[in-house]
Image: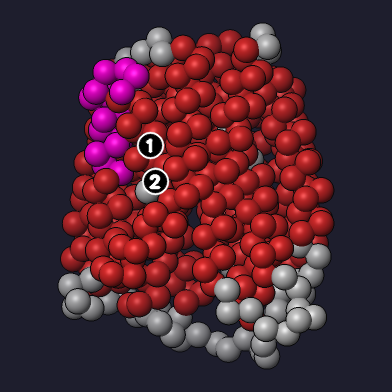
Amino acid sequence: MNPAAPSPVRFALGGLVAMAVGMGIGRFIFTPILPGMMSDLGLTPGDAGVIASANYGGYLLGAVIAGFGWASGIERPLVYASVTASAALCLAMSVADGVMLFSVIRFLAGIASAFMLVFTATIVFSHLAAANRQDLQAVHFGGVGTGIAVSSVLVAASSASGHGWREDWVGAAILSLVGLVAVFALIREGPVREGAARAEPPVAWTPEFIKINIAYGLFGFGYIITATFIIAIVRSSHGGPLLEALVWFVTGATGAISVFLWAPLLRRAGPFVSLALGCAVQAIGVAASVVLPSPGGPLIGGLLLGVTFIVITAFGFQAGRVLLPHSPRRVMAVMTAAFGVGQIIGPLIGGYVANITGDFTLATLAAAAGLVIAALFAYSAGRQKR
């Protein structure tokens, strides 16, 4: 490595902080704050599902927009702008009222998180590749779980101090601004350029690629119901603020180290088997969160959700690139769309079913069933490659 080149560790840490702010806080802090909003504002599970789906709809739109080539050369300012927007939108949630306004704010936050994800990865991964330090990608992805764990501590401390959900959003905005300062310090250069981008061939809709997209869409549907409502499930079982914080902290802490934990299996078995096993393990956790009594059920649910959802996202993209190695950007765009559709549908169905049944049990078991089917499709998609 050129001794004058920027440190790959610095970029990996910058990616970690950006992911913690834009994803772990900006996108997922809604989960621990949601029960307080439902209680104080009288929101139904269906209302909560609409607000959550708006965020995932914004994420899908943002990922699609960011996937075009218009941002070449301005990735770094866009990372700064996205993290700033995430902080501002957290603050906006603290003063907003009504399902419609909440949904608009969360939709915009979804766009911001998608922009942050795409443009930060563009910068960080290019520098890691130039330094031959792709192993540090695990540090970058660990930012999602780190942000979730930090947000659990924030909400728990706020609750212990007698503050409500509005103060939680203010705290999220302050944390995001602190993260922005760190991102400025750590990500000081744009991506490494290696000639002009080459045109990719169109996506070939082989049976295997269709299967992997079905698996990815079902994963989006299955994980997001629990990722959205797991703290509301704890609240409905009278678990108390301490258990709520602990479940979400466990989710984030295991998510932060999940890429390291799964790396040996990925090297040994490949992305298809790893993806299938990840979905199966997550299905067990999702079902446990409502089948087993509290506190064990939600804790197991949070643990298995955290240890799987980040790596399944990565395994899916790797499997898609194995099937269509010459179209990596197009593969990512198509699979992001499949995943995004599942994410949008999940909270809507989950909230609607919870409205009808009076609890989250049936909706959560449907999510677990979706993950089992996803595991079968993922395993089947890789049969020829094995």
The residue lying at 32 percent from left, 32 percent from top is 300
Mark number displayed over residue 307: 2
User: Considering depth in this image, is 71 or 250 the residue closer to the camera?
Assistant: 250
Residue 103 lies in what quarter of the image? top right
The residue lying at 30 percent from left, 59 percent from top is 275
Element at badge 2?
A: loop
- Horizontal and vertical percent for residue 262? 37, 57
Please determine whether, in this image, residue 284 is positioned above or below residue 264.
Answer: above
- Horizontal and vertical percent for residue 58? 58, 47
Q: Are marks 2 and 1 in contact (CB under 8 Å)?
A: yes
Q: Which residues are magenta?
A: 282-296
Please determine whether, in this image, residue 195 is positioned above or below residue 218.
Answer: below
User: Considering depth in this image, is 215 or 243 the residue closer to the camera?
Assistant: 243
Identity, as a three-letter code, of the amino acid under mark 2: Val
Please determine whether, in this image, residue 271 is positioned above or below residue 62.
Answer: below
Is 25 positioned to the left or the right of 354 in the image? right
